[in-house]
Amino acid sequence: MSDVPLIHPAAEGDEGEYRAGRAGHGHIKSYVRRAGRMSDAQHRYFAEMMPKIGIPYQPSNIDLAAVYGRNAPKILEIGCGMGETTAKIAEANPQNDYFGLEVHVPGVGALCKLAAEKGLANLRIGNHDAVEVVRDMLPEHSLDGAHVFFPDPWHKTRHNKRRLIQSPFVALLASRLKPGGYFHCATDWENYALQMLDVLGREPSLHNSVADPTPQALAAALAADSTEGLAGFAPRPDYRPLTKFENRGIRLGHGVWDVIFTKK
Ligand SMILES: C[S@@+](CC[C@H](N)C(=O)[O-])C[C@H]1O[C@@H](n2cnc3c(N)ncnc32)[C@H](O)[C@@H]1O
């Protein structure tokens, strides 16, 4: 197990609902367990597919080549939501293996359904907190890429600490990337885009895949809480499909920011 620190430990007086974690491993969760009703189809596909393509949580490293039965590039996708993007990417890139993580059970059911319908042989799914999976199950230098697409923005200032993209987790995830591997985040929340650029830019084992902003420009952007004119964001690569919701946002004139860094 790694001794890389977890996301900041929950402080005394914090809202109790976020503090539950595995005994002795408490860290602020980047999600709240939602009751969310599961459709019959999601139920059925979850039950049928998870024994085949689910990777249960275990508190020790797994051998990814053995899991997929081949030595193909391994890409982690954190927070698959309802799985549309994950399934599209896995289908379009049969040369890569994908490991999708999602805590929301109906979302896992939906992704299981897509995996069955599309016959995705290169997808495995974990229904567990990504912080613990990355920390406990993924060996150092085991990933060729990691995606964090539209993580929950936790937009109220007092909830910003729930955001997944924070220095301790970025350091942990970066340690799991192979040299040359990539870390790709995307968000439609401007303040989170700035946080992503700032936090990834401060991780010494990563470098920006596009031109870095100057420290002065980044400081000014953070102070103004605005990305306007700021360098450092990447164009959306073709492998990240536009989501329905993103298309709608773009039509309404909302921004989407991609932040792509490479492991040194
Ligand atoms: C806003 S949704 C985005 C879903 C999807 N990536 C997309 O682009 O549509 C964020 C998802 O991340 C999941 N999530 C949040 N924290 C997580 C964690 N620590 N481990 C696994 N999944 C997490 C949430 O349950 C939610 O489904």
Image (cartoon, rainbow, N blue to C red):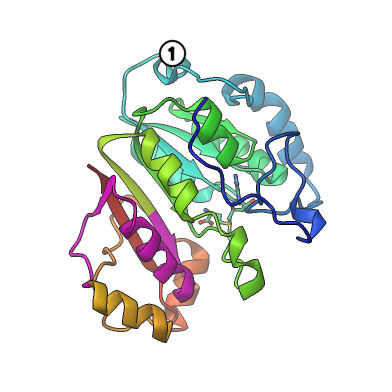
Please, which residue is most extreme toward the left here?
211
224 above or below 175? below
For residue 159, say whether it is visible.
yes
Quick check: is 192 in the magenta stretch?
yes
Residue drawn at (75%, 50%) of the image: 19
Task: Describe the element under mark 1 as helix, strand or loop.
Answer: helix
Relative horizontal placement of residue 123, taking residue 213 as reference (left or right): right
**What residue is rendered at 67% in x and 39% in y?**
109
Mark 1 surroundings: few (<14), some (14-19) or many (≥20) residues within 10 A: few
Tell me the quarter of the image containing the C terminus: top left
Residue at the (59%, 33%) spot, across then down = 126
The answer to whether residue 241 shows anywhere in this view is no
| Whether residue 85 is situated above or below residue 100 in the rendered picture | below
> What amino acid type should be assigned to the residue bearing mark 1?
Ala
Q: Name the residue under label 1.
A: 66
Q: In which quarter of the image is residue 199?
A: bottom left
Queried whether the magenta region covers residue 213, the answer comes back as yes
Indicate left or right for 96 with 123 as reference. Answer: left
Highlighted magenta segment, given as a residue range: 185-214
**Residue under the image location 52 percent in, 67 percent down:** 245
Q: Is residue 258 left or right of residue 63?
A: left
Q: In this view, does 143 lie above or below 216?
A: above
Q: Which of 81 and 184 is in front in this view?
A: 184
Instruction: Please tell me which residue lies in front, 193 or 216.
Output: 216
